Image (tube, rainbow, N blue to C red):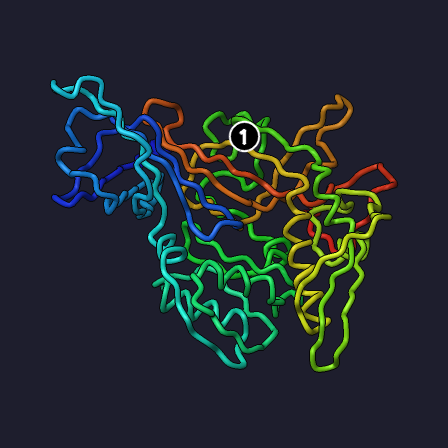
Amino acid sequence: MGDHTAEFVVELELSKGYITLDQAEIRKLYFIEDIFSYCMTGKLTISSHRGITEFGPLTGNERVRIVYGNEVHREVNFRIYKINKVDQVMPSTPSQEVIDILFTEETFFLFNFFKYSKSWQDKKATEIITDIATHHLEIDNWDKKEESIERFDFCMPYWTPNQAFNWLLKRGTGILTNQPGFLFFNNTRGANLVTLEHLLSVVFHTPLTVGDNIYSFLTENEVSYNKILYTNISGIDHSAYKYLSGGVMRGYDTKRKKFLEEDYKYMSSVKKQTILGRKTLYPEIDNLRVNYYNTMEDEEKMIDTIYYNAFHKKYVHGLMASITCRGHEDRYCGGMIELDWPSGDVKEWTNKNLNNYYLVKSITHSFNANATPAYKQKMVLIKNGYTDSDVDELISASKINISMG
């Protein structure tokens, strides 16, 4: 494929065979990968005069295959989850029908539609998750994996894999980072089982085959893959203060006949996370009104793990930016990019608060043959701290990951 042609092909697998959609038939096409989502999902809206619903017919077992890319062909396969609607203005005559389709990965159905009873003894949380993923989710393509430390017995009491993962992920501490906050997600590279802390602490630039790795609004190259076409930035959400400000987690040890209470504060909690800057997002926000949370756990260490797992994941949603660029097949959620954010002050070149590293939370891959460029990517980026700031009230980061270039 030549530079910036961004070809893409979409096929529907019906009971009677494959249909390759003409790009002119595709009104809307996108799919999303996200580090906080177990599966990739997407939407396809087609306008066709070929009578697809009659040729099929559409039963819900159809599949969507997308081949895309600039230099290298990538292929992703999905299964139709829901047909929202089929509009046909004149059913008695050959006319166009508009079909609105929601699709997801095959693993979505295995995650949510089947239940199992199974037990493990003296296993790490990541070992159990890997076993479920291999034997019940049919996952054999892994990208990043990090082991957990804790070992325990686990009984899966006729749960879906979704329920089991929700329980297990919050009870693991990463062996590479010694921090809770495990994530399981699929991206275009494969399945991932890593801590959020690992993604924040490792400098892993998005691999691009052309151009500079720094993303910029001001580049003179209008067809650069790294030129930011559109952007917006989220504001601070005060609703997060309730949990981030701290509280008391409770449990009960039946062997010692002892009530357990662990106290947590914002300042001590935020120092455990690697910050993409020298300053954290908030000043001291310890709450004078204590919040109590019951965990039903019988060990202090596990109560800590559950609290910090939730803290790490809630905190990173405090400040996010989204940027839209020309699509490139080598971008993926979970990677790190460097962004050159211009200053609003004419005396300054860059915005020292927002410049530097961002973690890619999600990517929306969208395709439109009638648009320029035909393949775009909207990246939602995590910025869990200010690169620098003159505001003295902000808590200074203890663990910092920034580019010194």
| Figure disc tally | 1
Drawn side of residue 264 relative to residue 146, left or right: right
Say above or below: 136 vs 288: below
Residue drawn at (55%, 63%) of the image: 167
For the C terminus, the quadrant is top right
For label 1, count other residues whose C-alpha is less than 10 Å away and answer few (under 14), some (14-19) or many (20+). Answer: many
Frontmost residue, 405 versus 90: 90
Residue drawn at (22%, 33%) of the image: 21
Residue drawn at (60%, 62%) of the image: 170
Drawn side of residue 193 relative to residue 356, left or right: left
Residue 356 seen in this snapshot: yes
Say above or below: 296 vs 313: below
Residue 24 seen in this snapshot: no
Q: Position of residue 131 (x, y in %)?
A: 42, 71
Q: Amino acid at mark 1?
A: Ile
Q: Position of residue 197 (x, y in %)?
A: 63, 57
Frontmost residue, 383 versus 111: 111
Q: Position of residue 63 (x, y in %)?
A: 26, 45
For the N terminus, the quadrant is top left
Where disc 1 sits, the SS reads loop
Drawn side of residue 221 relative to residue 237, left or right: left
Q: Quadrant of residue 116?
A: bottom left
Which residue is disc 1 drawn over? 228
Residue drawn at (43%, 74%) of the image: 118
Q: Position of residue 162 (x, y in %)?
A: 46, 58
